[in-house]
Image: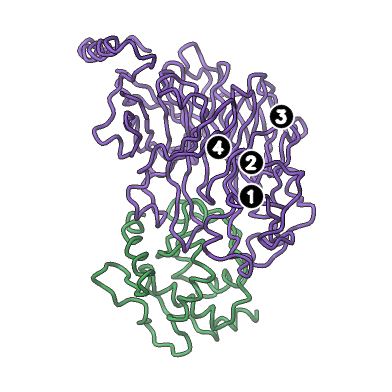
Amino acid sequence: MNRILALTITALLALTTGAFAQKSPAKKAGVAKPKIAVVTSSPGDGKAVYVQNCLTCHQADGGGVPNMNPPLIKTDYVLGDKTRLINIVLHGFKERVEIEGELYNNIMPALNHLTDKQIADVLTYVRNNFGNKASAITPAEVKKTRGK
Amino acid sequence: MKLKVAFSSFIPLLAAAGLLWYNANKPLVTSIVNPDTDNAGLKLPAGFGALRAAENIGKARHLAVTAGGDIYIKLMRPKEGKGIVYLQDANDDGKMDDTKMFGNYGGTGMYIKNGYLYASSDTEVFRYKLNENGQVTNPDAPEKIVTGLIEHGQHESKSLVVDNSDNLYVNIGAYSNSCQVDDRQPGSMGRKGCPILDSAGGIWQFKANKPNQTYKDGVRYATGLRNVVGLDWNQQDNQLFVMQHGRDQLQYLFPKLYTVQQSAIYPAECMYALKKGDNAGWPYIYYNQDLHKKIVAPEYGGDGKKEGSKDYIDPVAAYPGHMAPNGLLFYTGSMFPEKYKNGAFIAFHGSWNRSPEPQAGFFVVFQPFKDGKPFGKYEVFADGFSGSLEKTASGRADHKPCGLAQGPDGSLYVSDDVKGTIYRIVYNK
């Protein structure tokens, strides 16, 4: 959690200036370099989707809200199984979840009104921000999961 | 006060007492404990000081102080298997020295009345008999007073208070934001005749001294209250006062009706003075503190302006949105200056769903009262819990005030459920 605290100010500043600093102010690169080049998904669009649909609960720094909304920072839910992650966005999440010894209770609504591309964009964004580094998620993967 | 004070530490006490006598024309009881040099990191009105009575005790929710100055604290989650912390001050310097723990459940409620310590998990209420020294006599075998209360993960705190007629009042928070068909789903409308209100979304009254009560033994004392964490019995009015956590996410759920800025400050966090049978209107209405009106909730056909039914009670005071009032205490002590007597302290835990606007709260407010009713505007009494303005804005507060209690000398105690600091605020002028 200390790490989250330290990141907060940076993240807020980044938001207000439009730049997206990540680990420290000195390291301003960040968002726009997905580890795997996937032309169909743009993390830039993902940020807009995040601000519109996710930020209220998961917060500007991705750190969530203690006891309520889970953090998106280096958790298995975000970095692990893509299908599980896509399903959480499509169907919402109502389980009480424990992450690093903290319990999170709040309900996440289903966001299945978002397009495949919007979901791919926002998940790619989340998987490559807040200190995360993971492969992109493609609209095709979202489409496949949605179809099941 | 305990008598086992070492002589060496008694000398400064005597000196302090001498100073008090020297100042004897003042009617105030003046504190004999020394504030921390940094006032425990708090910003307080002139003449007040604060010390850290204890630190790192866990997620400290509500707390109660005995006539001897010992402290009982309810932890949200058990620490090493124990959910109630008992702190004693061996040398009366205000710094708690001895820690004992008992109770194998987490929760919020903690209250002392008529020789009993009342404690709640998120589904039950227990009480422990106190001896003449304020010590629990049956730490492993409390009486179970209420059992089987609803807990569905949201608004689970069973905060409690006892009146002067052996009645116990328990908050049973609504397991929903606004009783939508799909909770927290943008655009989802409200459920007709919100069924949640049958068993939650209100204050239930039970007998304080009768074991094993369930819903059928209790009375739904007041309804239409989304979630109450801070509550207290007003001795002047002989009446229950509660602080409601107002609903979340007006803009996120109904973006065509509300701006982000409106959503950050509305609806109000409301103080209600309750009578039996009152209905405060959740989920059908919310209170707009600037219009001073009850507004129909968008889930029930509201447009942000349409007024709701007059049948719902009005708050007696209203505060900016989402600041999460988790503690309420009517100050009956004599240590603080006269203006504080019978007024209300409110611990605002701090907001989260003002995002992307800056968060707010993380302070203790004083609400002046006159003749048993709020009188005039509230003032921030103790600030600085978060650690900095940036931490307040981001919501990443170092400490969040939660519970309030009054000590036998009139000190005000504040718990913090982030790091588990117990603050003691004293008046030193």
Q: Is residue B393 visible?
A: yes
The chain letter under disc 4 is B
How far is the residue under mark 4 from the one under mark 1? 18 Å
Do the dots labelled 2 and 3 sit on one chain? Answer: yes
Q: Which residue is mark 4?
A: B230
Residue at 62 percent of width and 44 percent of height: B227
Residue B302, quarter of picture: bottom right
Report if the CB atoms under discs 2 and 3 are less than 8 Å apart: no
How many residues crowd mark 2 within 10 Å: few (<14), some (14–19), many (20+)?
Answer: many
Which badge, 2 or 3, is on the more N-terminal residue? 3
Most foreground residue, B333 or B84: B333
Q: Amino acid at mark 1?
A: Tyr
Do the dots labelled 4 and 1 sit on one chain? Answer: yes
How far is the residue under mark 4 from the one under mark 2? 15 Å
Q: Which residue is mark 1?
A: B287
Q: Amino acid at mark 4?
A: Gly
Q: Which is closer to the viewer, label 3 or label 1?
A: 1
